[in-house]
Image (tube, rainbow, N blue to C red):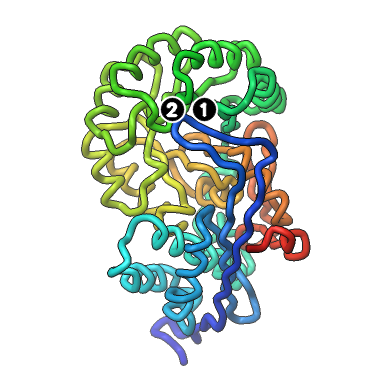
Amino acid sequence: MGNRFGRDAVRIDRLEVSAYTVPTDFPESDGTYAWKHTTLVLAEATAGGKTGLGYSYADTATAALIRDSLAEVVRGRDAMAVPGAWSAMVAAIRNLGRPGIASMAISAVDSALWDLKARLLDMPLVTLLGAVRDAAPVYGSGGFTSYALERLRDQLGGWAARGIRGVKMKIGTHPADDLDRVRAARDAIGPDVELFVDANGAYSRKQALAQAEAFAALGVCWFEEPVSSDDLEGLRLLRDRAPAGMEIAAGEYGYDLFYFRRMLDAGAVDVLQADATRCAGITGFLRVAALCQAHALPLSAHCAPSLHAHPCCALPDVRPLEFFHDHDRIEHMLFDGTLSPVGGALRPDLSRPGLGLEFKRQDAARFAV
């Protein structure tokens, strides 16, 4: 059946979901959490003989929600009308609550639908979205608090040696040790690579202020979640009183625009973070970017580097995206076409349609949940 633009709708005939739990290569922890495995929830949407994929790093309950609730909402809709499917999914989870698992489920499906649309048009996703730049700069992210100093130095120094111009490490598990760990990181990367720290909300306000002064002497220029991201007054305090040249960042736990608007209205951050695997997919991520633009603040993508490279290349004001060790490793294990930094940036492969990823089903089978 044709629409008002004179084309026939391409109906989504299938939406499938699966989940894969991959052990970490070494125990990982930050200031408030520790983990030994990570679960990737994969959504695959089919229409017109093409299949698009999207994913979230989430609990297996996310997969159940997609299978039991969202698949029925999406099936039969026009694959070219992604925002319409997004709105229908948001309406369908009204009684379940927007934040958390429901939003991560929408994220995986929405990204699959964008990938599908680009494949149907036989173009890279960045071309569909409208490219602003050829490549998205990254910062290396890891430096877990579970790492001994030698492992910390090797990882961060290795990224610096590869031409990545910024690295981030975790702090906060043992605050008394943090200054020595930051000093070791600076020694490993040299004076010219930017050094970021992430406390994941482990510090109190006064503790974070004291640490910020000490870290500034070592050239730390990014302090992520020095206090809980729910403490907007505390984040604003840190933003106002942190040493000159040190930016306060937060936002990775945002699931809807209202969360991000509250954070921006509070003047809580210098750099807002958003995660397309949490904030309702690429559609949600682009809407967060528009909100940032309205507030004249930059946006940085949190984790999932292979998912964020294309949308980040289509945005006017972005900071380096997070090249997270755990997710980069998983994405290389489970997908062909995974991007690796060259010259400190991820460059979308314009010879491949959509996100440029193909699921390695046979390799992934041993991790299936």
Vertical arrangement, residue 341 with respect to residue 99, above or below: above
Q: 166 or 178: which is nearer to us?
A: 178
Q: Answer yes or no: do the residues labelled 1 and 2 have beta carbons within 8 Å?
A: yes
Vertical arrangement, residue 3 with respect to residue 178, above or below: below
Q: Seen from this angle, which residue lies furthest bottom?
A: 1
Q: Check disc 1: other Cα within 10 Å, few if <14, some if 14-19, many if 20+.
A: many
Tell me the residue that label 2 is attached to: 199
* Residue at 25% in and 23% down: 237
Q: Position of residue 200 (x, y in %)?
A: 42, 32
Vertical arrangement, residue 58 with respect to residue 80, above or below: above
The answer to whether residue 338 is left or right of residue 195 is right
The answer to whether residue 8 is left or right of residue 328 is left
| Quadrant of the snapshot with the C terminus | bottom right
Instruction: Indicate the secondary structure of the residue bearing disc 2.
Output: loop
Q: Check disc 2: other Cα within 10 Å, few if <14, some if 14-19, many if 20+.
A: many
Vertical arrangement, residue 71 with respect to residue 19, above or below: below
Q: Position of residue 34 (x, y in %)?
A: 53, 37
Q: 23 or 66: which is nearer to us?
A: 23
Tell me the residue that label 1 is attached to: 170
**Tag 2 or tag 1, which sits nearer the N-term?**
1
Instruction: Indicate the secondary structure of the residue bearing disc 1.
Output: strand
**Label 1 – label 2 distance at C-alpha:** 6 Å
